[in-house]
Amino acid sequence: MTAFLTMWDADASLGGRIVLDGADLQVKVGELVAVVGPNGAGKSSLIRAFAGLLPLTRGAVRLGGDDIGTLSSRDRAARVAYLPQERQIAWNLPAIEIAALGAPFLRAADAQARARDALKEVEAGHLADRGVAEMSGGERARVLLARVLTTGSRGLLVDEPIAGLDPEAQLMVLERLQARARGGQAVLVSLHDLALAARFADRIVVLDHAKLVTDDTPMKALTPEVMSQVFGLSGRWIDGPVGPLLAAGRRQLPG
Amino acid sequence: MRVSRLTLALAALIVAAVFAGVLLGESVFDGHQWAQAFSDPESGPGEVLWQVRAPRVITALMVGAALGLAGAVMQGLLRNPLADPGVLGVSAVASLGAAVAIVLGAAAIPGVVEVSSLAGAGLAGGLLILFSARVRSPEALILFGVAVSSFAGAATALIFNLSPSPIATAEVMGWLLGSVQNRSWVDVAWVTPAVLLSSVLATLTASGLRMLSLGEETARTSGLPMVRLRLLALLAAALATGAAVAVAGVIGFVGLAAPHLVRSAVRGDPGRVLAPSALAGGLMLVVADLLARLIPTDQELKLGVLTALVGAPLFALIAWRAAREWRL
């Protein structure tokens, strides 16, 4: 399969600090790729560069074969949908209206029909008419994810979608993103939870200090060496009930 | 459907308030005078109704609508429930423009104060558009607006400070307090096209304001032409504010409170709140002007003073309800 999201030799900086340093990455249709790394490693920057929100100082980003700079904002949105880490919503809008914002160019009734399906997909159908002010943080996260699923874009760029969710909701969200990938979308998601990244991703990209350290299948990407050098953790793979599981712990300090 | 009912209800209230505004006032007519007022517009009672009260009421309606609309646009654009037409400094610079015209002795020339005030609003709007093209953060835009507002306020104070004529100073002060007293059909002709144009511009921005509810980055990646929509929103707000200040001086609280009065009826939607906010603003000002005329005082109450006096406690009540809703 051809790559849908492509980045070559990308450099970017933010406020004088280098946030991407020579990043190369491809995400194919049908793939779920997880970006992991310590805080400040450049995960959000990588995703924002694909969304066109972070200008590159060198290199290029292509979406569906076309350079991102040549696409109109509408064409870009038709190719990739972006879910930021930020979950602030300014007004007490009902969930259905928020999810429908994923399809701003459709007729209101069509957008709402699609939004209703997306809310059901993230098990938030019962929240459709509830205002965001009356929702928990987890419910709000589901509704915002539903907006991204409403877009129908081929590429999904999802920044920390499971932060602050309970364990069951974390699994549900990652299952849905995996299903979207299997259904023909290219999904790039940043995660802090290494075990869940290893469980759901087809490939894992490890970032450290703005550099791409490794890009491989979970077992090859999260080796004991990478776990130790990048995360300061001891980690090993064990047999679990649903396949190999990554077990990680704090590295034993000498002495 | 709730929005339609809300719009209809507001429109019906406006019709009632406009009738009351035209029919009630300081002059009390007997039956013969009423008949004369309606049968002969050139007669004394006819003049009072159609050349004094009616243009005054319509001016209040248009100015209130402009302020309500500008407040709703500002709140949506800045994602801030405390934003109002004054927050970005447009009112202050428009006031400065009018103050300069009055102090220079140009107030006697018809239209000069209005043009000068509109020029001030245009200048402030232009500065804001230039700034927002470079900086997208609403917080930064608010801070820039506060700086513009403070500077214009200081410049207006400097005019008071240095003005050699106490008459001109009193005139500026009276104008700054806000009023629609003695407004004519010429004023209506000034303000109406500006309000209609800003309403059209604001309506075009509704989808963008709605998308901005989810934050700057979501809006920028939504596919909507956010740069153009932001520009239109600023233009709409500056034009509406400038027109209102040019015709009626500075009138507070309407722009801040009108969107909050109707927001829950449109479930918070910053796009759908625009038209009801304009209607609510118009209604508020027509009623406030009627009260200003009917409350017996030696000197007629200034509209800006009355809206602030009545609006502040009302707004505190709205804020209390909103805080409960948002569990602040």
Image (tube, coloured by chain):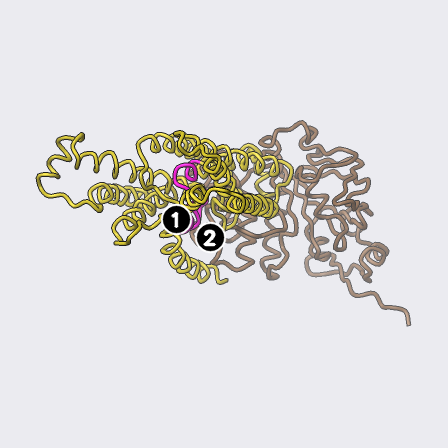
- Specify whether residue A194 is painted magenta: no
- List the residue tagged with mark 1: B304
Q: Are marks 1 and 2 in contact (CB under 8 Å)?
A: no
Residue B215 shows in the view = no
- x, y percent for residue B129: 57, 35
At mark 1, the secondary structure is helix
How crowded pointer 1 is (Cα within 10 Å; few <14, some 14-19, many 20+) is rated as: many
- x, y percent for residue B139: 59, 48
Res A196 quadrant in image: bottom right
Question: Is residue B155 positioned above or below B200 on the image?
Answer: below
Res A72 quadrant in image: top right
Q: Which chain is yellow?
A: B
Relative horizontal placement of residue A177, taking residue B266 as reference (left or right): right
In the image, the segment drawn in magenta is B243-271
Residue at x 53%, y 54% (from the top left corner) = A140
Q: Is A221 or A13 nearer to us in this picture?
A: A13
- Identified by mark 1, the residue type is Gly
Task: Please tell me if label 1 and label 2 are on a single chain.
Answer: no
Relative horizontal placement of residue B280, taking residue A191 as reference (left or right): left
Q: Quadrant of the N terminus of chain A?
A: top right
Q: Quadrant of the C terminus of chain A?
A: bottom right
Q: Is A31 or B216 nearer to us in this picture?
A: B216
- List the residue tagged with mark 2: A92
* Chain identifier of the residue bearing label 2 in the image: A
Which residue occupies the extreme front position in the image?
Answer: B164
